[in-house]
Amino acid sequence: MKGIYDCRIIAQTEIAPGVVRTLLSGPEIARESAPGQFVNLRVAKTTDPLLRRPFSVHAVYPEEGIYSLLYAMVGRGTRLLNEIQPGESVSVVGPLGKPFDLGDSPEAEHIVVAGGCGAAPLHFLCAALCKKWSCNNVKVLAGAQSESAVLCEAEFKSH
């Protein structure tokens, strides 16, 4: 169920040049999020910037009450988010949006196409598809501007 939560930053890790994975403690969001949903974060304690920033939910670990975001640092909002230190909290609204449809046939083959930072929510999708149907029915096609810019390759291979 959508709500406003104070979520504690656990870690901020640069996984590729200019790409950051942020782990947050937020049991409600970790438990309630579905693949394809997103959260809106207040990236500063002040009203500048005024608006929250949207981020796709990258992965959830409901047993631990943890979820992650994956984003490219391309503007002021993502830079401000990346400057928040582990242990500090951020205000989060979510989960928001309509989840992906996981289908209704155990025989269906699922082809997931990911490009650059668009791969962020697709790791969560693949995990859900594997859990519901089987990883044997999930194929991922991932690309980017360069080989080093392909994101989530290890996560996709683990499925």
Image (cartoon, rainbow, N blue to C red):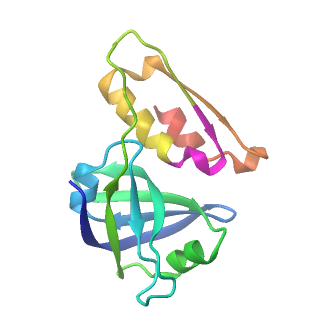
Residue found farthest to the top: 107
| Residue at left offset 65%, top offset 72% | 75
Q: Residue at x 42, y 42 (%)?
A: 124
Q: Can you give x and y, in whole percent of width and height, for residue 96 in the image?
A: 34, 54
Residue 112 in the image: x percent, y percent?
Answer: 54, 29
Q: How would you classify the magenta stretch by its main secondary structure?
A: helix
Question: Which residue is painted at 27% across and 57% down in the image?
Answer: 29
Between 43 and 141, the one nearer to me in the picture: 43
Which residue lies most toward the right here?
A: 146
* Left or right side of 22 for 89: left
Residue 41 colored in magenta in the image: no
Q: Which residues are magenta?
A: 113-120
Q: Quadrant of residue 114?
A: top right
**In the image, residue 3 above or below residue 99:** below
Is 58 situated left or right of 151 in this image?
A: left
- Pinpoint residue 59: horizontal percent, then vertical percent: 40, 49
Asked if residue 91 lies left or right of residue 57, the reply is: left
131 in relation to 84, above or below:
above
From the top left corner, tell me how far across and down residue 106 is, in percent: 34, 13
Where 124 sits versus 111, above or below? Answer: below
